[in-house]
Image: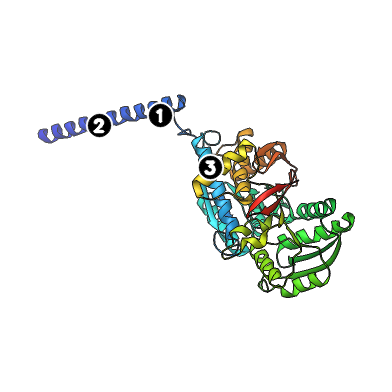
């Protein structure tokens, strides 16, 4: 019994010694980490937590050029912000989900991100999925900033804001630019009646056209089920004497329209909105057919400011190609989140709803200068206030026009 008690005493002493050593090591590690953070030698506070920002858009399917550009632009911004110390000392985790430009798939992607722990949403990329997801973020009171969802319904709820122009804005501005620059008096329109983006722009263009001395001589629709053969729409535009064809549509259909117009000897001026951005990257498309096409955009790689030059250079270095407007929208979106979150003192330990409430106030107080505009501000309606640009495709590149 004495031997047993002696043995147990030795074991207890050894355990106490090991515990003391462990406590001493942990204390030193904590102190060292604090000293390092205080000295500013880390890219972010070890105790700052992590912001989980989600993204949704098409990286497969017909609109993949948009989604991939948004994903790349956002990831570049996240990398830069994390290397510079994060948001209020907290790093960003970014998780981007593919929705294939489909509303149901987009809602499923949103639920996947919620399960992951998303605190704010940078998305979605295209309008119809964005409208579907906006209903979900409103119900959850989660802050949503879409880089490129342009339908008016994308930001109908008070928790949602956008970087890009709205469809009503694009339609009105297009009519004003065409009329103000006297590009044409007789205009034909080819639009997608099954798509919120396209039909929304067309409706507002048509409402403003008369004020600009524009006669809409032909307005022909197609749908997602009939978006390959445009011979009927083009023939009606040609027969009506249209001098300009307005295309408030996406680049895939636009590339087919330009090809088919060339085959029938129809050579009007073509004018589009930001949905045409990406047409020069359509597989097997003869880009010479896009020569002279005009399109509205908030961004051009031809801009001379240092912010845009650095963004273009860094994007090319990372992805081997120049960014388009969608990449710039997403790049700015992440920096907008950073700017507003820091201004309002938002931290990762706040609830999703509390983050949203603070961001809503912060957005209406913000003045942001990025790659897609200077002194951008937002109203409570979620709409950005900024000036558009118009570019012309010349020799296979976008050239800024007055």
Q: Residue at x 72, y 74 (%)?
A: 231
Q: Secondary structure at mark 3?
A: helix
Q: CA distance from mark 3 to mark 2?
A: 51 Å
Residue designated by label 3: 314
Q: Residue at x 85, y 58 (%)?
A: 209
Mark 3 and mark 2 residues within 8 Å of each other at the beta carbon: no
Query: Compared to 399, does 281 lie above or below?
Result: below
Q: Nearer the viewer, residue 41 or 344?
A: 41
Q: CA distance from mark 1 to mark 3?
A: 32 Å
Please tell me which of labels 3 and 2 falls first in the chain: 2
Which is closer to the viewer, label 1 or label 3? 3
Q: Secondary structure at mark 1?
A: helix
Label 1 environment density (alpha carbons within 10 Å; few <14, some 14–19, many ≥20): some
Numbered label tally:
3
Looking at the rendered structure, which numbered label has been put on residue 33? 1
Label 3 environment density (alpha carbons within 10 Å; few <14, some 14–19, many ≥20): some
Mark 2 and mark 1 residues within 8 Å of each other at the beta carbon: no
Q: Secondary structure at mark 2?
A: helix
Query: Compared to 215, does 84 lie above or below?
Result: above
- Image coordinates of residue 316 in percent, x first then y, are 53, 46
Query: Compared to 51, does 248 lie above or below?
Result: below
């Amino acid at each position: 019994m004495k031997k047993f008690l002696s043995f147990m005493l030795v074991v207890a002493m050894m355990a106490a010694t090991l515990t003391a050593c462990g406590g001493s090591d942990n204390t030193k590690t904590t102190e060292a980490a604090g000293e390092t953070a205080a000295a500013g030698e880390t890219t972010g506070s070890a105790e700052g937590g992590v912001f989980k920002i989600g993204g949704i858009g098409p990286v497969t399917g017909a609109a993949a050029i948009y989604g991939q550009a948004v994903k790349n632009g956002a990831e570049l911004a996240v990398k830069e912000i994390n290397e510079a110390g994060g948001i209020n000392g907290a790093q960003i985790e970014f998780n981007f989900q593919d929705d294939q430009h489909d509303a149901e798939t987009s809602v499923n992607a949103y639920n996947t991100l919620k399960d992951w722990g998303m605190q704010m949403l940078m998305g979605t990329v295209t309008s119809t999925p964005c409208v579907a997801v906006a209903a979900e973020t409103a119900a959850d009171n989660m802050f949503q900033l879409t880089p490129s969802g342009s339908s008016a319904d994308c930001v109908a709820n008070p928790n949602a804001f956008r970087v890009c122009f709205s469809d009503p804005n694009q339609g009105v501005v297009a009519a004003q630019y065409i009329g103000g620059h006297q590009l044409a008096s007789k205009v034909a329109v080819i639009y997608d009646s099954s798509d919120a983006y396209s039909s929304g722009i067309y409706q507002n263009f048509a409402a403003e056209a008369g004020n600009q001395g524009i006669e809409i001589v032909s307005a022909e629709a197609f749908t997602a089920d009939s978006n390959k053969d445009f011979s009927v729409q083009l023939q009606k535009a040609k027969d009506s004497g249209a001098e300009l064809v307005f295309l408030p549509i996406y680049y895939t259909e636009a590339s087919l329209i330009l090809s088919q117009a060339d085959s029938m000897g129809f050579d009007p001026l073509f004018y589009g909105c930001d949905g045409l951005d990406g047409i020069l990257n359509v597989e097997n498309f003869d880009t010479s057919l896009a020569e002279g096409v005009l399109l509205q955009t908030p961004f051009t790689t031809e801009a001379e400011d240092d912010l845009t030059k650095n963004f273009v250079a860094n994007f090319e270095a990372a992805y081997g190609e120049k960014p388009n407007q969608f990449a710039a929208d997403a790049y700015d979106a992440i920096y907008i989140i950073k700017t507003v979150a820091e201004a309002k003192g938002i931290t990762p330990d706040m609830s999703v709803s509390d983050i949203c409430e603070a961001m809503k106030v912060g957005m209406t107080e913000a003045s942001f200068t990025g790659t897609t505009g200077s002194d951008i501000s937002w109203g409570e309606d979620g709409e950005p206030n900024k000036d558009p640009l118009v570019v012309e495709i010349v020799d296979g590149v976008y050239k800024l026009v007055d």
